[in-house]
Image (spheres, grey):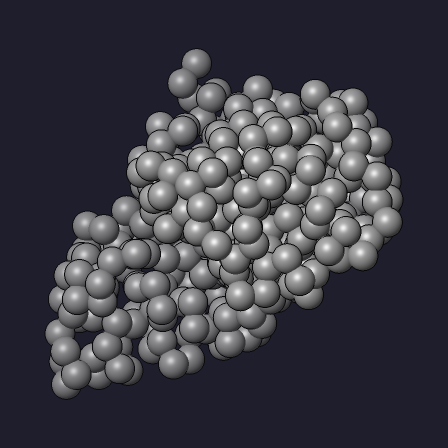
Amino acid sequence: MNRSIIGIPMGDPAGIGPEITVKALVNESIYEVCCPLVIGDAEVIKKAAENCKLDIHVNKVATGTEGEYHKGIVNVIDLGNIDMVNLEYGTVQAQNGIASYEYIKKSVELARNNEVDAIATTPINKPALKAGNVDFVGHTEILASLTNTEDPLTMFEVRGLRVFFLTRHVSLKQACNMVTQERLLDYIGRCTEALRSLGIKEGTMAVAGLNPHSGDHGLFGTEDMAQIVPAVTKAKELGYKVEGPIGADSVFHQALIGKYNSVLSLYHDQGHIATKTLDFERTIAITLGLPFLRTSVDHGTAYDIAGKGIASEVSMIEAILLAARYSGSYSNWYENECIGKKK
């Protein structure tokens, strides 16, 4: 089998994850580049196909190598952990929180055993996780815990624009306080290495400014001059190709047209607004620093439309294709740079 196997944990059964999965897997382009393997509940997948009016065969398999990978067949490692009688679309249920965690856990197990080459995740629901006593706020935290990875990196990619995040789910006030020379220098180095893990070795990274016009020499705040400028200067001395701070009102456009190979965004909404405004459906999240590559749709469970068969699969298709595109480079990098150095 020359094509990479991409594991797809199907997400919250009461959300749109199963729907966008089956809709994506009737797209011929996916089978041209990879072998998609769903980790979930076979009955939920069958019901999702029915809701979407899709004529597919759900093929239960024990391993990825048993699958038949072509249009019309959805290969599923069936955990059988959903009571279909009590499943209610669009509703927070403990069984769904527990199940969605178990799909991720199984996917990680497969990836760690080299049975899948990367994983492409679908939405999970935080209240459902809580209802099921799963003590995590999201995918990144779950993956970090299951792999003993400290502070994995998040990168968004859309239409060639790549955006890293210095901070994620913290208040804006806390995010501003986390813009320090030490943290910036650490992230510049880690983000550069992350790009290399994807095979991206050329180009310059840009660090977004924090204040309007990057503070305009202290007129609108001193953080850019006091923290970002020294960090970028030190990074250049260490050999990193980086510029900044670059005003956040222009840096994302400059990266989009190729002036920079990536942008280090300083807080959650700074990067999210830029990427999602460009193309909401095709903005894909990539988690880097794990022992395997993970891509993900960047939208939620959409409980309001779950079960209706109308959810768009565009983002799911992009997540799978991106996982297939980068999985080889990432696996080689991890084996050579991480495992190799430990030996």
Q: Quadrant of the rendered structure where residue 169 is?
A: bottom left
x and y percentages locating residue 139 in the rendered image = 43, 44
- Quadrant the C terminus occupies: top left
Against 35, residue 243 (above or below) is below
At horizontal 26% and vertical 51% (from top left) the residue drawn is 185
Looking at the picture, tell me which residue is in the foreground, 225 or 25: 25
Answer whether residue 314 is visible to the viewer in this image: no
Looking at the picture, tell me which residue is in the foreground, 320 or 22: 22
Answer whether residue 47 is visible to the viewer in this image: yes
Q: Is residue 29 left or right of residue 293?
A: right
x and y percentages locating residue 330 in the rendered image = 56, 37
- Quadrant the N terminus occupies: top right
Q: Is residue 325 left or right of residue 210?
A: right
**Residue farthest toward the front in the current orientation of the protein:** 85
Q: Quadrant of the rendered structure where residue 293 is?
A: top right
At horizontal 61% and vertical 35% (from top left) the residue drawn is 40
At horizontal 79% and vertical 32% (from top left) the residue drawn is 59
x and y percentages locating residue 143 in the rendered image = 42, 36
Looking at the picture, tell me which residue is in the foreground, 328 or 65: 65
x and y percentages locating residue 265 in the rendered image = 36, 64
Total of numbered circles in the picture?
0
Looking at the picture, tell me which residue is in the foreground, 264 or 121: 121
Against 224, residue 147 (above or below) is above
